[in-house]
Image: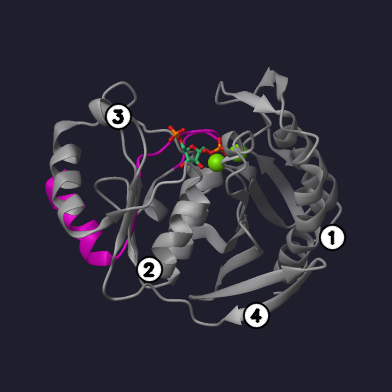
Amino acid sequence: METVDTILATVAAAAPEIRGGLTGRRRKADEENPSGEIQMAADVWADEHLEAELTAIEGVGEFASEEREHVVDCGEGLSVAIDPLDGSSNLKSNNSMGTIVGIYDVPLPAKGTDLVASAFVLFGPITTMMVARDGSVTEYVIEDGEQRVVTEDVTLPDDPTVYGFGGRVPDWPEAFTAYARDVEDELKLRYGGAMIGDVNQVLTYGGVFAYPGLESRPEGKLRLQFEGNPMAYIIESAGGRSSDGEQSILDVTPEELHQRVPLHIGNAELIDRLESAL
Ligand SMILES: O=P(O)(O)OC[C@H]1O[C@](O)(COP(=O)(O)O)[C@@H](O)[C@@H]1O
Ligand SMILES: [Mg+2]
Ligand SMILES: [Mg+2]
């Protein structure tokens, strides 16, 4: 689908500019986002930048972002939901972060099963982009705003080696803690504080990433439209599984745009075990 190509190319083309603009924007902005979190100057700036570029595309009908309250209506066509900067608290400590995009063919908020493609741009030592589309996942390197394929048909390695779990350990429910103790016995910890970085480790080495429901916040931290759905779509397209604890993240019915969801994604066998444990 041509519009999907245009959206993905636009996100790729914006990446070097967004990355370049981070340097002077590592301070806090004076605002909170709709999830009640203090925004960084870079969050606001990346959101405005991507809004301008994505709403200008013919064939994009709706635009929504983690950093703004309401859906922007911009014509007829596909709906684009973004997390302009995932892991922006890593900006201060200069660790990895990036952009997540979900492309839906129904109005927002939407179910993950209504995604037609999703992607994330990762600002690591190099800039890469992982795209899930038509049941397969492709990894690109972005150079000068152009996408160059590095790996076709990305699939989760059969023999998983890494895990990363968010939230304070004493705040984990007992059943999740028991599961974590089990996983710790087999896999090694990789937690960097930006979901896309941590999930990219799972895609590369196999394993499991979770930001579970917490005792203090049973709905977890990550947002369904902007984070949960697009990342679950990538992992499922790469042969893995996703779960909110009971069902695929992609089957969760959204009630509101900024709703949160407990997120567990990775190799199928590890997610099967998670569901049994919970
Ligand atoms: O600081 P914590 O509790 O470990 O949370 C980390 C999680 O929060 C996030 O940073 C939330 O995303 P945003 O940076 O887009 O708000 C995830 O990337 C990450 O997995
Ligand atoms: Mg995020
Ligand atoms: Mg964000």
157 is higher (above) or lower (below) than 89: below
Q: Where is the N terminus found, in terms of image quarters?
A: bottom right
Q: Which mark is residue 17?
A: none
Q: Is residue 31 left or right of residue 181?
A: right
Q: Nearer the viewer, mark 3 or mark 1?
A: 3
The residue carrying mark 2 is 205
The residue where tag 3 is placed is 214
Q: Secondary structure at mark 2?
A: helix
Would residue 36 be found to the left or right of residue 167 on screen?
right
Q: Are marks 4 and 3 in contact (CB under 8 Å)?
A: no
Q: Which residues are magenta?
A: 254-278
Mark 4 is surrounded, within 10 Å at the Cα level, by few (under 14), some (14 to 19) or many (20 or more) other residues, namely some
Which residue occupies 83% across, 58% down?
Answer: 57
The residue under label 1 is which amino acid type? Glu
Give percent across and percent down for residue 56: 86, 53
Residue 260 lies within the magenta run: yes
